[in-house]
Image (cartoon, grey):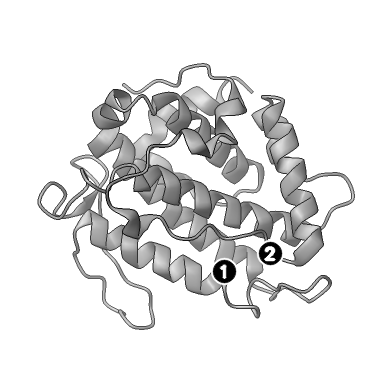
Amino acid sequence: GLHLNKVKSKSLSNHESLRSGQNQRTFRPKKSAPSGSKGAQLKKHIDATLGSGNLREAVRLPLGEDLNEWLAVNTVDFFNQVNLLYGTLTEFCTPENCPTMTAGPKYEYRWADGVQIKKPIEVSAPKYVEYLMDWIESQLDDESIFPQKLGAPFPPNFKEVVKTIFKRLFRVYAHIYHSHFQKIVSLKEEAHLNTCFKHFILFTCEFGLIDKKELAPLQELIDSIIVPY
């Protein structure tokens, strides 16, 4: 099965180490942290704790901080991370190589956003990821969901919104691990992928963001991350 190498988490902040894919289209402009200076402060906290190499510490809600603010800043952060990781694979994850969005033989994801596309449609993996990232981005840009002004209220269903985003970001990881892991290894991105995924999983576990059944495609890998608690 897949295994996580013990990696110094420093590689996380070192996004520059990522090769720029030929296909720049998926390298979306990086989203900056929401809610102005507050978001920036929390982002600094994340980077500092990540730099120390303690991922468990890095996911915890800092003392006295607002949970919604913390969820918001991290949602933007993980969105950026998954974009960068997937961006290194755009020349390999093509409609020809990946005609459907799968995570191993047993799991296939179809796209629906409940608005434009109500009935789930089967699309290629790159198309799925494109739909997904556009869909997340439109929420991050919507100030009624992710308020930009300090003290502006979060919507009452904010945690549900975040859960759906995380559930779907997980699918990109599941696809990368199942369909492109050898390529990641050959690009020497394995340590970076594993650290990003470990951070993502510890965060989702800390705040109960993804249902267990959704995690099934990478359960073995996840157990190897969670068990050492």
221 over 45 or under it: above or below: above
Q: Position of residue 22 (x, y in %)?
A: 27, 47
Label 1 neighbourhood size at 10 Å, few (<14), some (14-19), many (20+)? many
Residue drawn 19% across and 63% down?
123
For the residue marked with disc 2, what is the amino acid? Pro
SS at circle 1: helix
For the residue marked with disc 1, what is the amino acid? Leu
Label number found at residue 140: 1
Q: Closer to the N terminus: mark 1 or mark 2?
A: 2
Question: Camera-side residue: 174 or 51?
Answer: 51
Marks 1 & 2, CB-CB < 8 Å contact: yes
Label number found at residue 24: none
90 over 186 or under it: above or below: below
Residue drawn 47% across and 30% down?
192
Q: CA distance from mark 1 to mark 2?
A: 8 Å
171 over 133 or under it: above or below: above
Label 2 neighbourhood size at 10 Å, few (<14), some (14-19), many (20+)? many
Q: Which residue occupies the extreme right position in the image?
A: 64
Q: Give the residue at mark 2.
A: 34
Q: How many marks?
A: 2
Residue 210 seen: no
Lateral position of residue 198 relative to residue 1, left or right: right
152 over 82 or under it: above or below: below
Q: Position of residue 201 (x, y in %)?
A: 54, 39
Q: Which residue occupies the extreme left position in the image?
A: 96
Question: Camera-side residue: 14 or 143?
Answer: 14
SS at circle 2: loop
Residue drawn 74% across and 66% down?
35
Pick the quarter of the image with the C terminus: top right
Q: Position of residue 86 (x, y in %)?
A: 36, 46
Lateral position of residue 191 relative to residue 185, left or right: right
Pick the quarter of the image with the N terminus: top left
